Image (cartoon, rainbow, N blue to C red):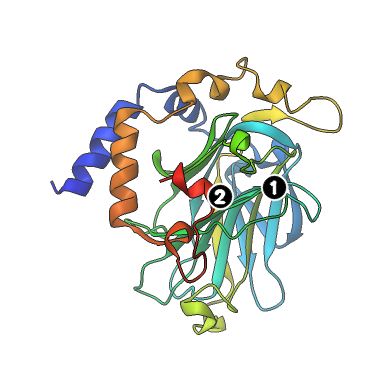
Amino acid sequence: MNKTEYIFSVLYYVSILSVIVIVDARGRGGRVFDKNYVVTWGNILKFNQGREVQLLMDKASGSAFESKHNYGSGFFQMRIKLPLRDSAGVVTAFYLTSKGNAHDELDFEFLGNRGGKPIAIQTNVFTNGQGNREQKFVLWFDPTTNFHTYGILWNPYHIVFYVDKVPIRIFKNKKRFGVGYPSKPMKVVASLWNGEDWATDGGKAKINWSYAPFKANFQRFFDSGCHMDGQKQSGKFCGSAIYWWNRRIYSRLTENEEKAFKHVRTKYMNYDYCSDRPRFPVPPIECRWNQ
């Protein structure tokens, strides 16, 4: 067993005891798509009595769905299997976003590649319309052959991006130091779309349409957040400890999560805006806390 396998195996067995895994395990049978989500555009197929959906993309259109509710905090997970074969230029996305130009957003974007080349996962954080906080990783597994779980924990303390229960990115709440932090009501969105202008090799690798339609499959459609629809809930209430994800135990990573976090970022992260000196001669202020 190599070092990577050892670290991930330790994290996995420890995390079995955690609340996150308990919540995840309750839904092995899956939640029906129509209960919490709606199709917003394009072609979508449903399988397994609505417990799995497939987004389709061809030359005419991509596709997307979103949650029925807006949220003010939560732990949002989706099991995803990415398009097979040559998917250069194809973007599969799972994210939270608010409405308007000055929006908040938390992104997972899966950037397709030529057959046999690794698929990258890009994360981004928008606060009040300001993004440009990209961090990119090469996945340590093939995300096209099986489902894998991707999650976003959003609470008053921090935002954590997870891949199969492994934390890969943290964005801490440092509002008291002038750093923006997502606070607007956000919906959960998933989409499959044409990103060939930028997604692969800086836009040099275009989509091979002979492999269309491209297909991305999604499972596990849970409602695992604090509803913030209209004036029914306030952002302050959604930060309450009555929700398990807001308890202080989830204000920081566990020791084993810290080890896995550092290992992934050392071995698999291939871009960090905080280290891009030509782009940011002076690193953005939040970088000092999120490494």
Q: Is residue 78 above or below residue 284?
A: above
* Amino acid type shown at disc 1: Asp
* Amino acid type shown at disc 2: Phe
- Mark 1 or mark 2: which is in front? 1
Left or right of 100, for residue 19: left
- The residue beneath circle 2 is 218
| Residue lying furthest right | 231
Element type at marker 1? loop
Could you classify mark 1 by the number of other residues whose Cα lies within 10 Å: few (under 14), some (14-19), or many (20 or more)? many
Could you classify mark 2 by the number of other residues whose Cα lies within 10 Å: few (under 14), some (14-19), or many (20 or more)? many
Relative image position of residue 254 (x, y in whole percent): 36, 28
Element type at marker 2? strand
Q: Which residue is rendered at x = 29% and y = 53% of the image?
A: 266
Q: Could you say which quadrant of the image residue 113 lies in?
A: bottom left
Total of numbered circles in the picture?
Answer: 2
Q: Which mark is residue 160?
A: none
Q: Which mark is residue 104?
A: 1
Q: Which residue is rendered at x = 57% and y = 44% of the image?
A: 48
Q: Which residue is rendered at x = 49% and y = 83% of the image?
A: 205
Question: Alpha-carbon distance for marks 1 and 2?
Answer: 23 Å
Q: Is residue 164 visible?
A: no
Q: Could you say which quadrant of the image residue 203 lies in?
A: bottom right
Q: Is residue 27 above or below residue 202?
A: above
Relative image position of residue 107 (x, y in whole percent): 58, 52
